[in-house]
Image (cartoon, rainbow, N blue to C red):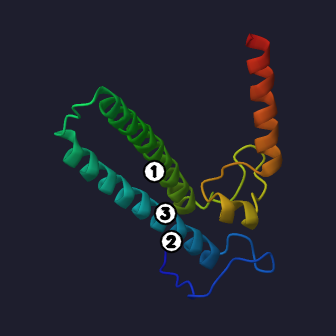
């Protein structure tokens, strides 16, 4: 991929060719910044858990509260780890020139949707169909 410069005030618009090199670079940078932020937050959380790890709360209610907080932090970190995987997949799609197109229909996902959810792999319509199908299958099992 050749070096593309994104102007500082650039925002993708529907008036320009969809997923042109500048737009792709814009989303690549957006995804990379998001990933760096998640990793930074995760590192802070990890250090906080390590610092608090040696303290045993003498009061049983305080200990239960501390354990609940640790469990919540660990669940959050697991969600963040999965999110990083999705960000990496989106970055790979950019490299393959597949980013911004629906995995189901091949149609453009749309700038507004990608701005809101840069890891989106489906158009809104395809996502709604997917969710309806999941609900139907879940209802059939109950």
Vertical placement of residue 71 versus 30, above or below: above
Pointer 3 and pointer 2: residues touching (CB < 8 Å)? Answer: no
At label 1, counting other C-alpha atoms closer than 10 Å, the crowd grade (few under 14, some 14-19, many 20 or more) is: many
Q: Residue at x 39, y 42 (%)?
A: 73
Say which residue label 2 marks.
29
Q: Residue 33, position in %: x, y?
A: 46, 68
Q: Residue at x 60, y 54 (%)?
A: 119
Q: Residue 128, position in %: x, y?
A: 80, 41
Pointer 3 and pointer 1: residues touching (CB < 8 Å)? Answer: no
| Residue at disc 3, secondary structure | helix
Quarter of the image where one finds residue 60? top left
Q: Residue at x 61, y 79 (%)?
A: 22
Tell me which numbered mark, 2 or 1, is placed earlier along the sequence.
2
Vertical placement of residue 31 versus 104, above or below: below
Distance (Cα) linking label 2 and label 1 = 14 Å
Q: Residue 34, position in %: x, y?
A: 49, 63
At label 2, counting other C-alpha atoms closer than 10 Å, the crowd grade (few under 14, some 14-19, many 20 or more) is: some
Say which residue label 1 marks.
84
At label 3, counting other C-alpha atoms closer than 10 Å, the crowd grade (few under 14, some 14-19, many 20 or more) is: some
Say which residue label 3 marks.
34
Between disc 3 and disc 2, the foreground one is: 3
Vertical placement of residue 52 versus 13, above or below: above
Tell me which numbered mark, 3 or 2, is placed earlier along the sequence.
2
Quadrant where the C terminus sits is: top right
Q: Residue 83, position in %: x, y?
A: 50, 48
Tell me which numbered mark, 3 or 1, is placed earlier along the sequence.
3
Quarter of the image where one finds residue 25? bottom right
| Residue at disc 2, secondary structure | helix
Residue 56 lies left or right of residue 109; in this view the side is left
């Amino acid at each position: 991929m050749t070096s593309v410069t994104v102007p500082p005030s650039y925002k993708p618009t529907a008036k320009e060719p969809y997923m042109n090199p500048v737009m792709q670079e814009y989303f690549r940078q957006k995804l990379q910044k998001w990933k760096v932020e998640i990793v930074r937050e995760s590192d802070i959380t990890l250090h906080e858990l390590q610092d608090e790890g040696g303290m045993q709360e003498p009061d049983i209610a305080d200990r239960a509260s501390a354990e609940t907080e640790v469990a919540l932090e660990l669940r959050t970190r697991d969600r963040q780890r999965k999110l990083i995987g999705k960000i990496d997949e989106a970055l790979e799609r950019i490299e393959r020139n597949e980013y911004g197109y629906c995995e189901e229909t091949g149609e453009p996902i749309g700038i507004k949707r990608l701005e809101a959810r840069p890891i989106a792999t489906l158009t809104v319509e395809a996502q709604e169909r997917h969710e309806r199908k999941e609900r139907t299958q879940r209802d059939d099992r109950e």
